[in-house]
């Protein structure tokens, strides 16, 4: 800072206009704060512009393409069905712009001041903002760091258009002939199924022995992947990645030796790292974890009293839902409203085909934590409405403590799973027991009934499960 330079006075300053940042800004403005939101790129952040929204448009396109091919069963006949990825990309860009314009309009309607530029801390109460040739200094009362994350890069991978990460995959202008997918997260799964639907031959390389879901979900997911023609290679690590005239060769090593997988393109998803470069948190001596995440309490407050941090710069799942909740909590705390974060029952979803949604403990986790575990499972193939939809793949699994009948976890793969998981999360938060699920009336026919019958199966009372799998308790 130049001696004598004037610092503009501000109340609450938020660095980063992604889902966490703009939710925090609007909530604080609703509660009476004068809010300044600084964004160096585009409002909506990575989630809206490069991540969540673009990938979900791709997943929706894949779902509609597959559904169109199945419509003949309903007597809907089409001829000359074609898919043009360029049109999908145009639609994706339209959706992103519409949503981004909506965020900007909401900020303006709530009188949130928007500043374009790169921000960095000068001290515990001053921020500098650079934008091209301009430079301004602001003194603040409170600040929220919401700068998000950047993709973890694959070590020793050559730079090439054929090698894609989580930011570039949704801009791919042509469908790969053969796509190699590396990763064990929801993005890797979504993109594997998306491009399989678009016509790619897909090879999925998994370093672990299996996916990170409950064992029952993993079993069903593996069956679906095999049925769809996606080749899954498990328990191998990448030793080398080479570009060829035809595409990419990936050399793998595992317990069964060395093997090479060839593809025209490769996509990898290894998560994100906190985007804190040049922000100045080291200058403030702010407390961070050994791997670089900002340490916060359950309100989002950092080791510096008047500075909060939310989203991908903090520990925990790198999910927009976390950033949104943390943003609201930080804003409410700053405004004097009692508020806190609890990520115990945060939902984990994948917009695969069919979708996956989970919350709470898996069966194995519940056993490891010492519960006397009981489970209920119900196959979507026995659900009437799933049959009507022609989407009979999947299952619902619930995990209970048998001593108290307390719900511990809920895991679903199948039509409607993402929407239905909210019921499960609410039940987990309210410490529901099996009777709390069985007492209400469920619409018929509906996918909702699969959740009811999974709970009934916990005590052998599911109506639409075959008798040999039941032992009704009197």
Image (cartoon, rainbow, N blue to C red):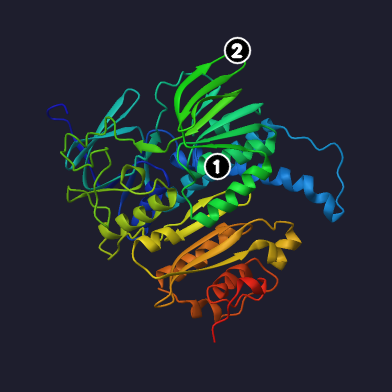
Left or right of 322 on screen, residue 261: right
Report how many numbered discs are placed on residues in the image: 2
Whether residue 167 is visible here, answered yes or no, is no
Q: Position of residue 183 (x, y in %)?
A: 48, 37
Q: Label 1, on which residue?
A: 189
Marks 2 and 1, the one that precedes in the sequence: 1
Whether residue 163 is visible here, answered yes or no, is yes
Residue at the limit of the structure toward the bottom, as seen here: 474
Q: Residue at x 36, y 51 (%)?
A: 25
Q: Image height check: is 251 above or below 436?
A: above
Q: Residue at x 42, y 38 (%)?
A: 271
Disc number at residue 245? 2
SS for dot 2? loop
Is the residue marked by circle 2 packed among few (<14), some (14-19), or many (20+) residues within 10 Å? few
Q: Are marks 2 and 1 in contact (CB under 8 Å)?
A: no
SS for dot 1? helix
- Which one is in front, 257 or 289? 257
Q: Residue at x 50, y 80 (%)?
A: 435
- Which one is in front, 114 or 441? 441
As measured in the structure, the alpha-carbon distance from the residue carrying label 2 to the one carrying label 1 is: 27 Å
Assign the C terminus to one quadrant of the image: bottom right
- Which one is in front, 432 or 82? 432
Left or right of 298 on screen, residue 237: right
Q: Residue at x 35, y 24 (%)?
A: 132
Q: Position of residue 292 (x, y in %)?
A: 26, 38
Assign the N terminus to one quadrant of the image: top left
Q: Position of residue 235 (x, y in %)?
A: 47, 37
Residue 416 placement: quadrant: bottom right
């Amino acid at each position: 800072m130049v001696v004598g330079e004037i610092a503009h006075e501000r109340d609450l300053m938020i660095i980063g206009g992604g889902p966490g940042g703009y939710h925090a800004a609007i909530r604080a403005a609703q509660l009476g704060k004068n809010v300044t939101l600084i964004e160096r790129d585009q409002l909506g952040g990575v989630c809206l512009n490069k991540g969540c929204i673009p990938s979900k448009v791709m997943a929706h396109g894949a779902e509609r393409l597959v559904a169109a091919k199945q419509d003949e069963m309903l007597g809907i006949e089409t001829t000359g069905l074609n898919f043009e990825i360029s049109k999908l990309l145009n639609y994706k860009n339209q959706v992103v712009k519409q949503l981004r314009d909506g965020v900007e309009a909401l900020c303006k309607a709530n009188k949130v001041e928007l500043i374009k530029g790169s921000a960095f801390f000068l001290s515990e109460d001053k921020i500098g903002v650079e934008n091209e040739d301009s430079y301004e200094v602001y003194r603040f009362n409170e600040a929220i760091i919401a700068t998000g994350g950047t993709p973890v890069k694959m070590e020793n991978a050559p730079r090439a258009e054929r090698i894609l990460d989580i930011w570039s995959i949704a801009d791919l202008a042509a469908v790969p002939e053969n796509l190699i997918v590396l990763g064990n997260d929801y993005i890797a799964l979504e993109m594997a199924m998306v491009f399989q639907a678009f016509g790619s031959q897909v090879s999925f390389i998994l370093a672990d022995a299996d996916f990170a879901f409950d064992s029952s979900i993993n079993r069903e997911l593996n069956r679906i992947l095999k049925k769809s023609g996606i080749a899954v290679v498990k328990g191998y690590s990448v030793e080398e990645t080479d570009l060829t005239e035809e595409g990419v060769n990936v050399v793998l090593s595992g317990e069964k030796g060395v093997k090479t997988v060839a593809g025209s393109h490769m996509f990898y998803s290894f998560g994100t790292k906190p985007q804190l470069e040049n922000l100045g948190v080291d200058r403030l001596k702010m407390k961070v974890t050994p791997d670089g995440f900002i340490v916060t309490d359950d309100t989002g407050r950092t080791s510096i009293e008047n500075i909060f941090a939310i989203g991908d710069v903090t520990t925990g799942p790198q999910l927009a839902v976390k950033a949104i909740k943390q943003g609201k909590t930080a804003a409410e705390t700053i405004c004097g409203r009692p508020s806190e974060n609890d990520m115990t029952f945060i939902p984990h979803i994948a917009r695969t085909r069919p979708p996956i949604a989970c919350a709470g403990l898996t069966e194995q986790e519940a056993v490891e934590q010492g519960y006397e575990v009981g489970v209920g499972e119900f196959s979507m193939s026995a659900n009437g409405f799933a049959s009507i939809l022609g989407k009979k793949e999947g299952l619902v699994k619930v995990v209970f403590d048998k001593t108290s009948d307390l719900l511990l976890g809920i895991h679903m793969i199948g039509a409607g799973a993402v929407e239905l998981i909210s019921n499960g999360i609410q039940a987990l938060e309210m410490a529901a027991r099996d009777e709390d699920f069985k007492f209400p009336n469920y619409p018929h026919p509906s996918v909702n009934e699969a959740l009811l019958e999974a709970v009934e199966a916990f005590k052998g009372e599911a109506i639409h499960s075959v008798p040999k799998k039941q032992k009704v308790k009197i």
